[in-house]
Amino acid sequence: MKIKYLTLFENYYNEFKNTSIIKNAISKGLVDIEVIDLKGEVTDGRVDGKIVGGGSGNLIRYDVVSDALNRYKSKKSKVILVTPKGKLFNQDLAIKLSKEEELIFVCPHFEGIDERIMDEVDYAISIGDYILTGGELASQVISDSIIRLIDGVINKSSLDTETFDNNLLEYPQYTLPRTYNNKSIPDIYFSGNHKVIKEYNIKQSLLITKQNRPDLYKNHVLSKKEEEILEKCDENYINEAIKKSNKD
């Protein structure tokens, strides 16, 4: 995948390109990142202008961004404008975008970009109901969620049971030590009973989603198996599994 960023602040991407999963994806040749400084795309030195009709602050000029897009996009490009006025980003959209060959992110600053740019983008995307100083951080959030889904970037097994699969949050996970600060890992995880552990995890995922994200939970259709787990996987059921493992 090729990813390009149209920005006024190319330095924002220095650490992004050279850290963790993103760095590995680039080194494997799975992702190619190009950062384009819009300030270098103008001849008169001005990338912004006053708002026509009045209003505080400046906007990035339409002609500057439009000309840059014409220079850097191809027939394969999908252009993404990051903006609080856009569609709310989610995992389904991340999966869809991860299948594209080339993405171009347009990163606003000041009070945004001249509205006419909307006719030249394929997606207007928001990462949440809040305002950032510019679009650079939002473009990195979206890019990170997309890049990790590309085949070969991370182990497929790590993607199999992730948060937001089937509109559910991921169940709690732990690592050693078993007890620290008087907080212990649930005993069921040491039982060796993988069937009951799996059922326990499913129930925890359902309960956490219902409590923390009722908006997601209401869109999740309980399977017959999940209904059975919610009914039978109680404290007594778990304790019996633990006792049996201790006897074995």
Image (cartoon, rainbow, N blue to C red):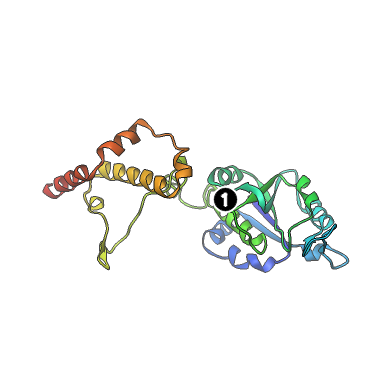
51 or 155, which lies in front?
A: 51
Q: Is residue 233 above or below residue 73?
A: above
Does residue 165 show up? no
Which residue is found at the position 45% from the left and 44% from the top? 214
Which residue is found at the position 52% from the left and 59% from the top? 21
Image x and y of residue 1, in percent: 63, 50
Disc 1 marks which amino acid? Ile
Instruction: Spot the residue most to the right.
Output: 44
Q: Which residue is mark 1?
A: 146
Report which quarter residue 194 is drawn in. top left
Left or right? Give the position of 91 relative to 45.
Answer: left
Left or right? Give the position of 20 relative to 124.
Answer: left
Which residue is found at the position 67% from the left and 62% from the top? 134
231 or 198, which lies in front?
A: 231
Image x and y of residue 47, in percent: 81, 64
Left or right? Give the position of 216 relative to 85.
Answer: left
Instruction: Spot the residue most to the front.
Output: 54
Circle 1: element type: helix
Image x and y of residue 127, in percent: 59, 53
Which residue is found at the position 81% from the left and 62% from the top? 41
Q: Is residue 71 above or below residue 75?
A: below
32 or 124, which lies in front?
A: 124
Count of marks, rendered view: 1
Does residue 136 show up? yes
Mark 1 residue crowding within 10 angstroms, few (<14) / some (14–19) / many (20+)? some
Image x and y of residue 201, in percent: 33, 46
Instruction: Spot the residue most to the left.
Output: 247
